[in-house]
Amino acid sequence: MVAAPSGHENWSSRGAFILAAVGSAVGLGNLVRFPAEAGTNGGGAFVLFYVFCVVLIGLPVLLSEVLIGRHGQAAAPISFRKIAEESGGSKAWGTVASLGVFSAFLVLSFYCVIGGWVLYYIGLFAQDIVASGATSGAFADQSFEQVDSYFGGMVSNGVATSVLDVGFVGITVFFVARGVSGGIEKVAVYLMPAFFFLLLGITVYGMFGGALSRTVDYLFTFEPDKLSGEVMLAAVGQAFFSLSLGVAGMVTYGAYVGRDVNLASTSGMIAGADTAVALIAGLCIFPIVFVAGLEPNGGLGLMFQTLPHAFSDIPFGTLIGLAFFIMVGFAALTSSVSLMEAPTSWAMERLGLPRVQAALGVSVAASVLGVLCALSTGSLSSFHPLGFIPMFEGMGVLDVLDTFTGKLTMPIGALLTAVFIGWVASRRLLDEENGLSGGLHRFWLFLVRWFCPLVLTLILFGGIFPETTGQMLGFLSGG
Ligand code: PHE
């Protein structure tokens, strides 16, 4: 453990920070959300615009978040307040980060529910290997309907989903409670290389199946007329979720970064790795789906229904299926750890709690909310707590949390972060911290001052009034 000047813990090296931040970024967003969104949003048009969003919006905001944390060396709200004070801005900026910390808590609550389902599938495939060996296709002696019913059965079973959710929260807190270098960093340092190994292994396996060229066509054929307003908004939203932005998570991780680290190049590596994983995930998943003669469907069904069917049709399907869900579990865990660390560090510094108690408190609260999600997908499926608000009409708790954070609090958090760095933080401070010089420095300032706030306002507007915004953008892009 390396003590920082303020007495709190730091990452043991730059490499450990990069792995932890990549671990936070790479998660269900890359493996489930990205392929599904690319599939339903016109393939190549979405993918190309996504990369554009990562470079011009995601990366500048990522650098801003890490910079705020590194300068503040404290929990996110305190880091914001410190920079505001040094720059002559209002102390109220601390509240922006508090909103982020709260969003991280909300995302954590439903993320662990999905993490729990991943645990269930690991169990299913492990059981299948024991029953029918590693070489056959998965669920060889079961009917299509039977394989299909696993997902529905689990989602509608509120009690089982709750138990699995609490299990996933438990695994997460086990590491968060051990601290930055003793727990959070360890998960990333061991699991991220294992993740990459599994991802590349399964991708190479899929390439031999014969559906690679169809996948490449599907993901990368650029048809400009498909670039509608809705597709653009989906791409920007996905870039945010995938880079873990707008929830104070990267500010929190930045607080453990030493003075000697160049933040610009490190942020570039994090964003690059995250984008590479999203693209490789597409090349990993679709060949398996296509070879099995299936059509990819959107949302969680792609991972929890289509893929299990696909694994039942390929040689070594049980083994590949098990490896696949273990890989997803690793990615989800390194993300949930970062989601838990943001509120935990807040509780430690604000409420003066020791780390273990802070992490346990966050876990109990997230479990309560998670159980509510579980019950509302199961026995309380007609429970629509915020159904009177049009945006949440017909939604259970899990979907309300997903929509509320994805379409409101995350873009608001990122928008305010860009405004804070672009307009409030002193130039001298930015100069000292950001690791950029010359034209790139000016370009970054332009992006955080003008471009990011503008585009983020549009995403927010688009999240709240999808139809009007979709039409406006469609009109502008000629689609
Ligand atoms: N980026 C993570 C993913 O892609 C999700 C996440 C969002 C993690 C926000 C931390 C903070 O799954």
Image: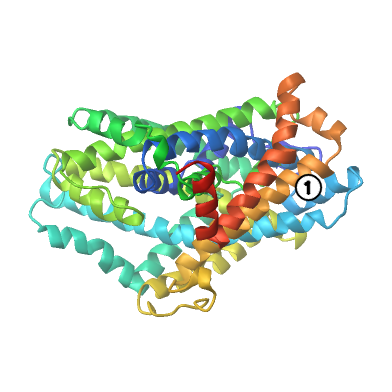
Q: Nearer the viewer, residue 168 or 79?
A: 79
Location of residue 366 in the rendering, given as x and y in whole percent from the top left corner = 54, 65
Location of residue 375 in the rendering, given as x and y in whole percent from the top left corner = 41, 75
Question: Is residue 80 in view?
Answer: yes
Quadrant housing residue 450: top right
Q: Which residue is mark 1?
A: 79
Left or right position of 216 against 475: left
At horizontal 36% and vertical 55% (from top left) the residue drawn is 299
Left or right position of 436 against 236: right
At horizontal 40% and vertical 34% (from top left) the residue drawn is 279
Q: Residues within 10 Å of mark 1 (few under 14, many from 20)?
A: many
Location of residue 395 in the rendering, given as x and y in whole percent from the top left corner = 44, 71
Give the position of the C terminus as an image quadrant.
Answer: top left
Location of residue 411 in the rendering, given as x and y in whole percent from the top left corner = 62, 52
Question: In the rendered view, how is the structure colored?
Answer: rainbow
Q: Nearer the viewer, residue 22 or 128?
A: 22
Question: Is residue 254 in view?
Answer: no
Give the answer, above or below, for where 243 lies relative to 407: above
State yes or no: Cβ of the residue under disc 1 lies below 8 Å from any atom of ligand 1: no
At horizontal 20% and vertical 32% (from top left) the residue drawn is 211
Give the answer, above or below, for where 383 lies relative to 136: below
Quadrant housing residue 196: top left
At horizontal 41% and vertical 48% (from top left) the residue drawn is 33
Q: Nearer the viewer, residue 299 or 220?
A: 220
Label 1: which secondary element:
helix
Give the answer, above or below, for where 169 lies relative to 337: below
As drawn, the residue found furthest toward the left would be 141
Give the position of the N terminus as an image quadrant.
Answer: top right
Residue type at mark 1 is: Ser
